[in-house]
Amino acid sequence: MDSVHSRSSILPVEILELIFSYLERCELVPVLGSNSVFHNTASRAVYRNISETSSVKAWRLIKTLASNATYSRHVRSIDLDFANNLITANILRLLNRALQQLKSLTTLILDFSQTDNAADIAWIFQGCSFSLATFTSSMRCDRSLAKFLAMQPTITELCLRGFNKEYDFTLEPRALPKLEHFRTVLSYPSIIGEVLRGRPVESVSMSLYPGDVCTSLDTLLLSARPIKKLTVMSFESDPPVALLPLIADRLPHLEAFHLVVLMTHYTHEILLEIGSSLAQFKALKYITFMAPGIPASFNDEKSVAEAWSKACPTLQTIILPKGLVWFQRDENWACLKDRED
Protein backbone atom coordinates (compact mmCIF):
# COMPACT_ATOMS: atom_id res chain seq x y z
CA MET A 1 0.00 0.00 0.00
CA ASP A 2 2.87 2.38 0.75
CA SER A 3 4.36 1.82 -2.69
CA VAL A 4 1.01 2.49 -4.30
CA HIS A 5 0.62 5.65 -2.27
CA SER A 6 4.12 6.85 -3.14
CA ARG A 7 3.52 6.36 -6.85
CA SER A 8 0.11 8.02 -6.77
CA SER A 9 1.34 10.99 -4.77
CA ILE A 10 3.82 12.04 -7.47
CA LEU A 11 1.05 12.26 -10.05
CA PRO A 12 -0.73 15.62 -10.17
CA VAL A 13 -4.37 15.50 -9.17
CA GLU A 14 -5.29 16.79 -12.62
CA ILE A 15 -3.67 13.73 -14.23
CA LEU A 16 -5.51 11.39 -11.89
CA GLU A 17 -8.80 13.11 -12.68
CA LEU A 18 -8.11 12.77 -16.40
CA ILE A 19 -7.39 9.06 -16.01
CA PHE A 20 -10.48 8.49 -13.88
CA SER A 21 -12.65 10.35 -16.41
CA TYR A 22 -12.19 7.42 -18.80
CA LEU A 23 -13.57 4.92 -16.28
CA GLU A 24 -17.19 3.91 -15.92
CA ARG A 25 -18.85 4.54 -12.59
CA CYS A 26 -18.82 0.82 -11.74
CA GLU A 27 -15.07 0.77 -12.44
CA LEU A 28 -14.45 3.72 -10.14
CA VAL A 29 -16.08 2.14 -7.10
CA PRO A 30 -13.12 -0.22 -6.38
CA VAL A 31 -10.75 2.73 -6.79
CA LEU A 32 -12.44 4.50 -3.89
CA GLY A 33 -11.09 1.90 -1.47
CA SER A 34 -7.52 1.75 -2.76
CA ASN A 35 -5.97 4.66 -0.82
CA SER A 36 -6.78 8.14 0.42
CA VAL A 37 -5.36 9.98 -2.61
CA PHE A 38 -7.27 7.84 -5.07
CA HIS A 39 -10.38 8.01 -2.88
CA ASN A 40 -10.50 11.80 -2.82
CA THR A 41 -9.96 12.12 -6.56
CA ALA A 42 -12.19 9.22 -7.58
CA SER A 43 -15.04 10.43 -5.37
CA ARG A 44 -15.13 13.66 -7.36
CA ALA A 45 -15.40 11.66 -10.57
CA VAL A 46 -18.07 9.35 -9.15
CA TYR A 47 -20.32 12.07 -7.76
CA ARG A 48 -19.75 14.92 -10.23
CA ASN A 49 -22.42 13.77 -12.69
CA ILE A 50 -25.05 11.34 -11.39
CA SER A 51 -27.79 9.63 -13.38
CA GLU A 52 -29.88 7.00 -11.64
CA THR A 53 -32.95 5.35 -13.17
CA SER A 54 -33.35 2.67 -10.49
CA SER A 55 -35.59 3.92 -7.69
CA VAL A 56 -33.89 1.64 -5.15
CA LYS A 57 -30.43 2.90 -6.06
CA ALA A 58 -31.72 6.47 -6.17
CA TRP A 59 -33.03 6.10 -2.62
CA ARG A 60 -29.65 4.82 -1.43
CA LEU A 61 -27.93 7.63 -3.26
CA ILE A 62 -29.99 10.45 -1.76
CA LYS A 63 -29.58 8.86 1.66
CA THR A 64 -25.81 9.07 1.22
CA LEU A 65 -25.91 12.63 -0.08
CA ALA A 66 -28.20 13.75 2.74
CA SER A 67 -25.76 12.53 5.38
CA ASN A 68 -22.34 13.01 3.75
CA ALA A 69 -21.29 16.58 2.99
CA THR A 70 -17.95 15.38 1.59
CA TYR A 71 -19.59 13.54 -1.29
CA SER A 72 -22.48 15.94 -1.85
CA ARG A 73 -20.18 18.91 -2.41
CA HIS A 74 -18.81 17.21 -5.55
CA VAL A 75 -22.19 16.93 -7.28
CA ARG A 76 -22.66 19.23 -10.28
CA SER A 77 -25.35 17.33 -12.16
CA ILE A 78 -27.96 14.88 -10.89
CA ASP A 79 -30.71 12.99 -12.74
CA LEU A 80 -33.16 10.99 -10.61
CA ASP A 81 -36.01 8.99 -12.13
CA PHE A 82 -38.94 7.99 -9.89
CA ALA A 83 -41.44 7.83 -12.77
CA ASN A 84 -42.17 4.13 -12.35
CA ASN A 85 -42.64 4.19 -8.58
CA LEU A 86 -44.81 5.97 -6.06
CA ILE A 87 -42.72 7.76 -3.48
CA THR A 88 -43.58 8.33 0.17
CA ALA A 89 -43.48 11.52 2.20
CA ASN A 90 -40.41 10.18 4.01
CA ILE A 91 -38.53 9.82 0.72
CA LEU A 92 -39.51 13.36 -0.27
CA ARG A 93 -38.21 14.68 3.05
CA LEU A 94 -34.99 12.74 2.54
CA LEU A 95 -34.71 14.18 -0.98
CA ASN A 96 -35.19 17.65 0.45
CA ARG A 97 -32.30 17.13 2.87
CA ALA A 98 -30.11 15.76 0.09
CA LEU A 99 -30.86 18.71 -2.20
CA GLN A 100 -29.97 21.12 0.60
CA GLN A 101 -26.51 19.55 0.67
CA LEU A 102 -25.90 19.97 -3.08
CA LYS A 103 -24.55 23.49 -2.91
CA SER A 104 -22.54 23.22 -6.16
CA LEU A 105 -25.36 21.75 -8.24
CA THR A 106 -25.89 23.30 -11.70
CA THR A 107 -28.02 20.68 -13.50
CA LEU A 108 -31.08 19.07 -11.90
CA ILE A 109 -33.37 16.51 -13.57
CA LEU A 110 -36.24 15.03 -11.56
CA ASP A 111 -38.93 12.72 -12.89
CA PHE A 112 -41.89 11.57 -10.82
CA SER A 113 -44.89 9.37 -11.53
CA GLN A 114 -48.12 10.85 -12.85
CA THR A 115 -49.71 10.18 -9.45
CA ASP A 116 -46.99 12.02 -7.54
CA ASN A 117 -47.10 14.90 -10.03
CA ALA A 118 -50.74 15.49 -9.09
CA ALA A 119 -49.61 16.76 -5.69
CA ASP A 120 -47.56 19.77 -4.66
CA ILE A 121 -44.04 18.39 -4.33
CA ALA A 122 -42.01 21.49 -5.20
CA TRP A 123 -41.61 22.06 -1.45
CA ILE A 124 -38.62 19.70 -1.69
CA PHE A 125 -36.61 22.74 -2.84
CA GLN A 126 -37.07 24.57 0.46
CA GLY A 127 -33.75 25.52 2.02
CA CYS A 128 -31.72 24.80 -1.13
CA SER A 129 -28.87 27.17 -1.97
CA PHE A 130 -27.66 25.86 -5.34
CA SER A 131 -27.75 27.98 -8.50
CA LEU A 132 -28.97 26.01 -11.49
CA ALA A 133 -28.18 26.48 -15.16
CA THR A 134 -30.43 23.61 -16.29
CA PHE A 135 -33.65 22.36 -14.71
CA THR A 136 -35.85 19.54 -16.00
CA SER A 137 -38.83 18.06 -14.18
CA SER A 138 -42.16 16.35 -14.66
CA MET A 139 -43.69 17.90 -11.53
CA ARG A 140 -46.84 19.94 -11.96
CA CYS A 141 -46.65 23.66 -12.73
CA ASP A 142 -48.11 25.34 -9.68
CA ARG A 143 -47.45 28.21 -7.30
CA SER A 144 -44.71 26.33 -5.42
CA LEU A 145 -42.77 25.57 -8.60
CA ALA A 146 -43.13 29.18 -9.76
CA LYS A 147 -41.71 30.35 -6.43
CA PHE A 148 -38.74 28.01 -6.80
CA LEU A 149 -38.04 29.17 -10.38
CA ALA A 150 -38.09 32.78 -9.19
CA MET A 151 -35.19 31.89 -6.88
CA GLN A 152 -33.08 30.51 -9.76
CA PRO A 153 -31.96 33.54 -11.81
CA THR A 154 -29.11 31.63 -13.46
CA ILE A 155 -31.27 29.06 -15.28
CA THR A 156 -30.66 29.18 -19.04
CA GLU A 157 -32.39 25.92 -19.99
CA LEU A 158 -35.78 24.84 -18.64
CA CYS A 159 -37.77 21.71 -19.46
CA LEU A 160 -41.28 21.08 -18.07
CA ARG A 161 -42.50 17.71 -19.26
CA GLY A 162 -45.21 16.67 -16.86
CA PHE A 163 -48.90 15.92 -17.38
CA ASN A 164 -49.83 19.45 -16.41
CA LYS A 165 -53.25 20.78 -15.59
CA GLU A 166 -54.01 24.46 -15.28
CA TYR A 167 -52.94 25.19 -11.73
CA ASP A 168 -52.07 28.62 -10.38
CA PHE A 169 -48.75 29.04 -12.17
CA THR A 170 -47.68 32.68 -12.31
CA LEU A 171 -44.03 33.64 -12.64
CA GLU A 172 -42.72 36.87 -11.22
CA PRO A 173 -41.77 39.28 -14.04
CA ARG A 174 -38.13 39.20 -12.93
CA ALA A 175 -37.95 35.41 -12.72
CA LEU A 176 -35.67 33.49 -15.11
CA PRO A 177 -33.94 36.58 -16.56
CA LYS A 178 -31.34 34.47 -18.42
CA LEU A 179 -33.63 31.80 -19.85
CA GLU A 180 -32.60 30.94 -23.42
CA HIS A 181 -33.98 27.44 -24.08
CA PHE A 182 -37.43 26.17 -23.15
CA ARG A 183 -38.76 22.66 -23.77
CA THR A 184 -42.17 21.33 -22.88
CA VAL A 185 -44.22 18.28 -23.80
CA LEU A 186 -47.72 18.47 -22.35
CA SER A 187 -48.06 22.00 -21.06
CA TYR A 188 -51.09 24.17 -21.73
CA PRO A 189 -50.60 27.29 -23.91
CA SER A 190 -51.13 29.40 -20.79
CA ILE A 191 -48.12 27.75 -19.13
CA ILE A 192 -45.95 28.16 -22.23
CA GLY A 193 -46.92 31.80 -22.44
CA GLU A 194 -46.16 32.35 -18.77
CA VAL A 195 -42.63 31.03 -19.26
CA LEU A 196 -41.86 32.85 -22.51
CA ARG A 197 -43.36 36.24 -21.68
CA GLY A 198 -40.65 38.90 -21.54
CA ARG A 199 -37.76 36.44 -21.31
CA PRO A 200 -34.82 36.17 -23.75
CA VAL A 201 -35.80 32.75 -25.07
CA GLU A 202 -34.46 31.92 -28.54
CA SER A 203 -34.99 28.14 -28.63
CA VAL A 204 -38.33 26.39 -27.99
CA SER A 205 -39.47 22.77 -28.16
CA MET A 206 -43.23 22.26 -27.87
CA SER A 207 -46.15 19.99 -28.72
CA LEU A 208 -49.21 21.01 -30.71
CA TYR A 209 -52.65 19.52 -30.08
CA PRO A 210 -55.92 19.85 -32.00
CA GLY A 211 -57.81 22.96 -30.96
CA ASP A 212 -54.78 24.68 -29.43
CA VAL A 213 -52.49 25.07 -32.44
CA CYS A 214 -52.88 28.80 -33.06
CA THR A 215 -53.03 29.65 -29.36
CA SER A 216 -49.84 27.70 -28.70
CA LEU A 217 -48.02 29.28 -31.64
CA ASP A 218 -49.10 32.75 -30.51
CA THR A 219 -47.15 32.25 -27.28
CA LEU A 220 -43.94 32.23 -29.34
CA LEU A 221 -44.44 35.94 -29.92
CA LEU A 222 -44.19 36.66 -26.19
CA SER A 223 -40.43 36.07 -25.96
CA ALA A 224 -38.27 39.16 -25.54
CA ARG A 225 -36.13 37.90 -28.44
CA PRO A 226 -37.03 36.41 -31.82
CA ILE A 227 -37.24 32.62 -31.72
CA LYS A 228 -34.36 31.21 -33.79
CA LYS A 229 -34.81 27.48 -33.19
CA LEU A 230 -38.16 25.68 -32.98
CA THR A 231 -38.91 22.00 -32.46
CA VAL A 232 -42.54 20.91 -32.84
CA MET A 233 -44.18 17.57 -32.14
CA SER A 234 -47.54 17.76 -33.86
CA PHE A 235 -50.58 15.71 -32.86
CA GLU A 236 -52.67 17.70 -35.33
CA SER A 237 -54.49 15.70 -38.02
CA ASP A 238 -54.25 18.45 -40.64
CA PRO A 239 -51.43 18.03 -43.19
CA PRO A 240 -48.10 19.77 -42.47
CA VAL A 241 -48.60 22.05 -45.45
CA ALA A 242 -51.33 23.78 -43.43
CA LEU A 243 -49.12 24.13 -40.33
CA LEU A 244 -46.04 25.68 -41.89
CA PRO A 245 -47.68 28.96 -42.98
CA LEU A 246 -48.97 29.43 -39.43
CA ILE A 247 -45.41 29.17 -38.14
CA ALA A 248 -43.89 31.28 -40.91
CA ASP A 249 -46.40 34.07 -40.30
CA ARG A 250 -45.25 34.30 -36.69
CA LEU A 251 -41.57 33.43 -37.08
CA PRO A 252 -40.43 34.52 -40.56
CA HIS A 253 -36.81 34.78 -39.40
CA LEU A 254 -36.62 31.31 -37.88
CA GLU A 255 -33.20 29.71 -38.48
CA ALA A 256 -33.71 26.08 -37.43
CA PHE A 257 -36.98 24.13 -37.58
CA HIS A 258 -37.55 20.51 -36.56
CA LEU A 259 -41.01 19.06 -37.16
CA VAL A 260 -42.22 15.65 -36.00
CA VAL A 261 -45.70 14.77 -37.30
CA LEU A 262 -47.36 11.85 -35.52
CA MET A 263 -50.94 11.72 -36.83
CA THR A 264 -50.49 12.30 -40.57
CA HIS A 265 -48.75 9.95 -42.98
CA TYR A 266 -46.52 11.57 -45.55
CA THR A 267 -46.20 10.88 -49.26
CA HIS A 268 -43.72 12.09 -51.82
CA GLU A 269 -46.36 14.46 -53.16
CA ILE A 270 -46.97 15.94 -49.70
CA LEU A 271 -43.25 16.54 -49.23
CA LEU A 272 -43.04 18.37 -52.54
CA GLU A 273 -46.10 20.43 -51.65
CA ILE A 274 -44.47 21.56 -48.39
CA GLY A 275 -41.84 23.41 -50.43
CA SER A 276 -44.22 26.23 -51.32
CA SER A 277 -44.82 26.92 -47.62
CA LEU A 278 -41.09 27.20 -46.94
CA ALA A 279 -40.86 30.23 -49.22
CA GLN A 280 -42.23 32.39 -46.40
CA PHE A 281 -39.16 31.80 -44.23
CA LYS A 282 -36.48 34.45 -44.76
CA ALA A 283 -33.54 32.99 -42.82
CA LEU A 284 -34.21 29.25 -42.45
CA LYS A 285 -30.93 27.30 -42.53
CA TYR A 286 -31.78 23.90 -41.03
CA ILE A 287 -34.95 21.84 -41.29
CA THR A 288 -35.88 18.35 -40.13
CA PHE A 289 -39.13 16.66 -41.10
CA MET A 290 -40.16 13.32 -39.59
CA ALA A 291 -43.49 11.54 -40.10
CA PRO A 292 -44.89 8.03 -40.52
CA GLY A 293 -45.34 6.75 -44.05
CA ILE A 294 -43.91 4.56 -46.78
CA PRO A 295 -40.18 5.32 -47.02
CA ALA A 296 -39.35 7.34 -50.11
CA SER A 297 -36.57 6.34 -52.46
CA PHE A 298 -33.18 7.99 -52.39
CA ASN A 299 -33.90 9.87 -55.62
CA ASP A 300 -37.31 10.99 -54.36
CA GLU A 301 -35.76 12.51 -51.23
CA LYS A 302 -33.11 14.22 -53.33
CA SER A 303 -35.81 15.78 -55.50
CA VAL A 304 -37.57 17.01 -52.35
CA ALA A 305 -34.35 18.58 -51.04
CA GLU A 306 -33.84 20.33 -54.37
CA ALA A 307 -37.44 21.58 -54.43
CA TRP A 308 -37.25 22.87 -50.87
CA SER A 309 -33.96 24.60 -51.57
CA LYS A 310 -35.43 26.30 -54.61
CA ALA A 311 -38.37 27.56 -52.55
CA CYS A 312 -36.15 28.59 -49.60
CA PRO A 313 -32.64 29.48 -50.87
CA THR A 314 -31.27 30.05 -47.36
CA LEU A 315 -31.52 26.32 -46.51
CA GLN A 316 -28.17 24.66 -45.80
CA THR A 317 -29.16 21.33 -44.23
CA ILE A 318 -32.27 19.18 -44.74
CA ILE A 319 -33.18 15.97 -42.91
CA LEU A 320 -36.10 13.98 -44.32
CA PRO A 321 -37.93 10.86 -43.02
CA LYS A 322 -35.28 8.42 -44.27
CA GLY A 323 -32.90 10.10 -41.82
CA LEU A 324 -30.41 11.14 -44.48
CA VAL A 325 -28.68 14.48 -43.97
CA TRP A 326 -28.86 16.53 -47.15
CA PHE A 327 -26.51 19.48 -47.68
CA GLN A 328 -25.25 21.66 -50.48
CA ARG A 329 -22.01 20.64 -52.17
CA ASP A 330 -20.72 22.29 -55.33
CA GLU A 331 -24.11 23.94 -55.86
CA ASN A 332 -25.82 20.55 -55.81
CA TRP A 333 -27.65 18.74 -53.03
CA ALA A 334 -25.88 15.68 -51.68
CA CYS A 335 -25.91 13.50 -48.57
CA LEU A 336 -23.50 11.26 -46.70
CA LYS A 337 -24.68 8.31 -48.79
CA ASP A 338 -23.21 10.03 -51.84
CA ARG A 339 -19.80 10.15 -50.17
CA GLU A 340 -20.01 6.50 -49.22
CA ASP A 341 -20.78 5.64 -52.85
Image (cartoon, helix red, strand yellow):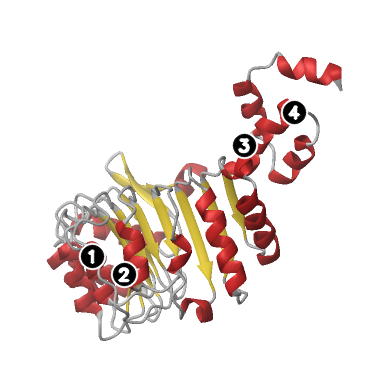
Q: Is 97 left, or right, of 132 in this rendering?
A: right
Q: Is 172 left, or right, of 88 in this rendering?
A: left
Query: Could you say which is closer to the camera, residue 91 or residue 239?
Result: 91
To which residue does mark 3 refer? 44
To which residue does mark 1 refer? 275
Pinpoint residue 171: horizontal percent, then vertical percent.
25, 65
**Which residue is at a point 27% across and 69% down the rendered structure image?**
192
Pinpoint residue 51: horizontal percent, then vertical percent.
59, 54
* Crowd rating for badge 1 (residues with CA inside 10 Å; few <14, some 14–19, many 20+): many
Q: Is residue 216 above or below residue 130?
A: below
Q: Is 248 left, or right, of 121 in this rendering?
A: left
Question: What whole-number distance in Å separates the C-alpha atoms at marks 3 and 1?
Answer: 52 Å
To which residue does mark 2 refer? 271
**Which residue is at a point 30% across and 58% down the rendered structure image?**
150
User: Label 4's element?
Assistant: helix
User: Label 2's element?
Assistant: helix
Q: Amino acid at mark 2?
A: Leu
* Label located before the other in sequence (1 or 4): 4
**Which residue is at a point 29% across and 79% down the rendered structure image?**
239
Q: Amino acid at mark 3?
A: Arg
Q: Are marks 3 and 1 in contact (CB under 8 Å)?
A: no
Tell which tag, 3 or 1, sits nearer the viewer. 3
To which residue does mark 4 refer? 36
Q: Amino acid at mark 4?
A: Ser
Q: Amino acid at mark 1?
A: Gly
Question: What whole-number distance in Å separates the C-alpha atoms at marks 3 and 2?
Answer: 51 Å
Query: Could you say which is closer to the camera, residue 186 or residue 331?
Result: 186
Q: Are marks 2 and 1 in contact (CB under 8 Å)?
A: yes
Q: Is 335 left, or right, of 270 in this rendering?
A: right
* Crowd rating for badge 4 (residues with CA inside 10 Å; few <14, some 14–19, many 20+): few
Pinpoint residue 143: horizontal percent, then vertical percent.
32, 72
